[in-house]
Image (cartoon, grey):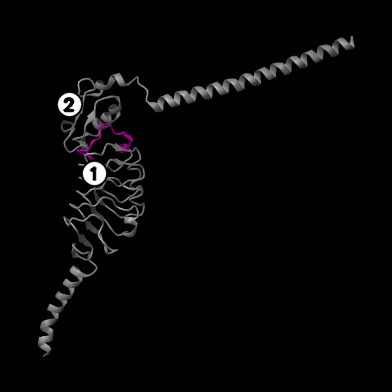
Amino acid sequence: MFSCVRWFQPFLALLSSTLLTWGYNCPSSCLCPDHHTVDCTGQGLTRLPDSIPLDVRRLLLSNNWIPWIPSDFLVLYSDLVYLDLRNNSLTRLEPGTLSTFSRLVYLDLGSNNLTEIPSGTFGESRSLIKLRLGNNPYLNMVSKDAFAGLTSLRELELERNALSVLDVGVLSQLPSLRVIRLEGNPWLCNCNFAKLFLWLLENRHKLPTGLDGMECSLPGDGRQVSLSVLSEDSFRECRGLLTLTDYLIVIFSGICISVVAIIASFFLASTIHCFQRLKSKRTDEEEAED
């Protein structure tokens, strides 16, 4: 009898492990191949599944119809390091979607319906290494501070979106960036593109397809040209142009100079007036003494 019990022990342990792995606290319609992975790929979900284990580390939600994720989602799942939301119906991201204390390393938001990436979206998440935002056909706006604080980000994908312009500050504030994908966007070769082009020239080694893989439309006839045939001289007409910020600085400086000049003139006139009164008083006193 004892030998039978010993024979059944490995079987019972395997059965118990299997039940815990596949059934314990696993969302319906999803698979949980291990204690820290939830796989809900291609389940036709229209919202985030219920009963996701709080200690989940890998969450696979690609190929569904999820339209949004709450801004506090990653606060609840603080152990999450891998999140795949590729090919869903996301139209926007709430500011602060990633918190400063998030442990997320990999985030895939590609192939959705995002229209813009506003400032503060990723909340200075310092652990994020790879961010995929490509294949969002309506994404035409990335705020200058959209990726502020992502000091560990090494790979950023923004390919095949609807971007015609991108502030170079978006990229220059990423000190760890090693790979950037920007091909397949409708870039315009105008003066707004000049600074980004110069950055791309200096960082062409970070482009997987090189400058050959990127094109832009000429302002005149809209003809598509490869960035590899352009040079710094292609934008020489832009060197003397001022941006809106430059104009505001000039206007503000002019106002400050005018104010200072008026104040200085007032004090100078007051000083001269006092000096004349003092001189007139002394003259009157001298005449009275005579």
Proximity of marks 1 and 2: CB atoms separated by less than 8 Å: no
Per the image, is 169 magenta? yes
Q: Which of labels 1 and 2 is toward the front?
A: 1
Looking at this view, is 180 or 111 the one in front? 111
Residue 194 coordinates in the image, percent (x, y)? 28, 26
Residue 240 coordinates in the image, percent (x, y)? 35, 19
Magenta stretch? 157-171
* Residue found at x 24% / y 52%: 66
* Residue found at x 29% / y 34%: 166
Looking at this view, is 49 or 151 the one in front? 49
* Residue found at x 24% / y 39%: 138
Relative vertical location of residue 33 with respect to residue 67 in this rendering, above or below: below
* The quarter of the displayed image where residue 136 is located: top left
Residue type of the residue flagged with mark 2: Gln
Question: Number of numbered discs present?
Answer: 2
Graded by Cα atoms within 10 Å as few (under 14), some (14 to 19) or many (20 or more), the crowding at tag 2 reads some
Residue 220 coordinates in the image, percent (x, y)? 22, 20
Residue position marked by numbered label 2 in the rendering: 224
The numbered mark, 1 or 2, whose residue comes first in the sequence reads 1
Q: Is 266 situated left or right of 23 in this image?
A: right
Quadrant for the C terminus in the image? top right
- Residue most toward the bottom? 1
Q: Which mark is residue 158?
A: none
Residue position marked by numbered label 1 in the rendering: 113
Q: Is 242 situated left or right of 258 in this image?
A: left
